[in-house]
Amino acid sequence: MTPIGLAHLTLLRLAPPDLVSVAAEAGYDFVGVRVKAVTAGEHQYPMQPGSPMSAETLRRLDDTGLEVRDIEFLTVGPDTGPADWKPALDAGAALGARTFSVVGTDTDPARLVDTLSALAADARPYGILPTLEPISYQPVRTVADAAEVATAAGIAVLVDALHVRRGGSTVADVAALDPALVPCLQLCDGPWEAPEHLDLPAELPLGMTADGSVLQIEARARRRAVGEGELPLAELVGAAPPGTPLSVEVPDAVLQARTSDLEVARHQLAAVRTLIGGTP
């Protein structure tokens, strides 16, 4: 059975302990947890080791049998260093996380590789592998570019269905990746072409921001469930190594406004199971 997890961005308004409970009740195998704020002004869940929230998350993981597979999210710019990533690694290690999602915003490729190499070295003792996500509105935007940087830095690539299409990559680019570079595949759906306009929700979870650009709004708040768009998701899953864990990352502000968190989680899981041929 292919493991299917619930990415925190799908239900970012849920604190990590509640995310675990909802994911378990819905039928997921693992969760991803945001342990580091991403955008300017974003609040951060208090997940430092030993904190009440970290302890409660661990208790619910034990009770449900779920695991935290990945933590997020580090933006790697020109001045990023150990002080930026060590607290997140500590928080992730306490949860038993295996990977740490990062994005490259540094426009100097050599410096970016050096920084990611240092991150990889610091993450190794924790048993955590950094994964570089190519994002359509960032300097590292294509699967091929991310693979080149990741290979040089000794890390992996986080393939996201939306950013594959929006960043100008193809299923063939994913199929060409060294299987060792692909520890997880993030799934969502959307129209084939980027929308010309999307309304920014009045409020994003945790005070997360988007600068108003269509690509940011779509990625952070207006994705669609698997099967509700035009992305080549079956082909994408087929291009990944067999058995690659699938993470459901579908922040959909419209859906969340009209239904419960549990129903959101169930809806997204049923859609992925239908895609891969399982029972909805």
Image: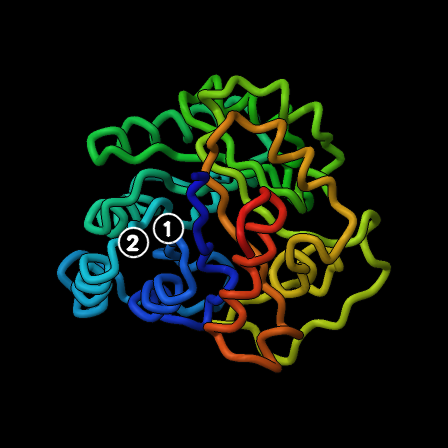
Task: Give the numbered dot on residue 56.
Answer: none
Q: Quadrant of residue 16?
A: bottom left
- Image check: 167 left or right of 273? right
Q: Tell me the quarter of the picture where residue 267 sits.
A: bottom right
Residue count near mark 2 (Cα–Cα under 10 Å), binned few <14, some 14–19, many ≥20? many
Going by the numbered disc 2, the residue's amino acid type is Leu
> Which of the two residues, 183 or 234, is positioned nearer the viewer here?
234
Residue 10 x %, y %: 52, 62
Q: Horizontal and vertical percent for residue 74? A: 43, 46
Instruction: Kindly indicate the quadrant of the structure image that contains residue 254.
Output: bottom right
Instruction: Give the residue at the far front of this rendering.
Output: 279
Q: Name the residue under label 1.
A: 29
Quadrant housing the C terminus: bottom right
Q: Where is residue 137 in the image (x, y as percent from the top left)?
A: 68, 46
Task: Name the residue rendered at 25%, 52% in the picture.
Answer: 91
Residue at image point 45% right, 55% down: 6
Query: What residue is disc 2 on?
Result: 66
Between disc 1 and disc 2, whose residue precedes? 1
**Residue 271 horizontal/vertical position (percent):** 60, 56
CB contact under 8 Å: marks 1 and 2:
yes
Labels in figure, total: 2
* 160 relative to 190 in the view: left or right: left
52 displayed left or right of 4:
left
Q: Is the residue 235 above or below the residue 25 in the image?
A: above
Q: Which residue is drawn at 62% across and 30% down?
A: 238
Label 1 Cα crowd, 10 Å radius (few <14 / some 14-19 / many 20+): many
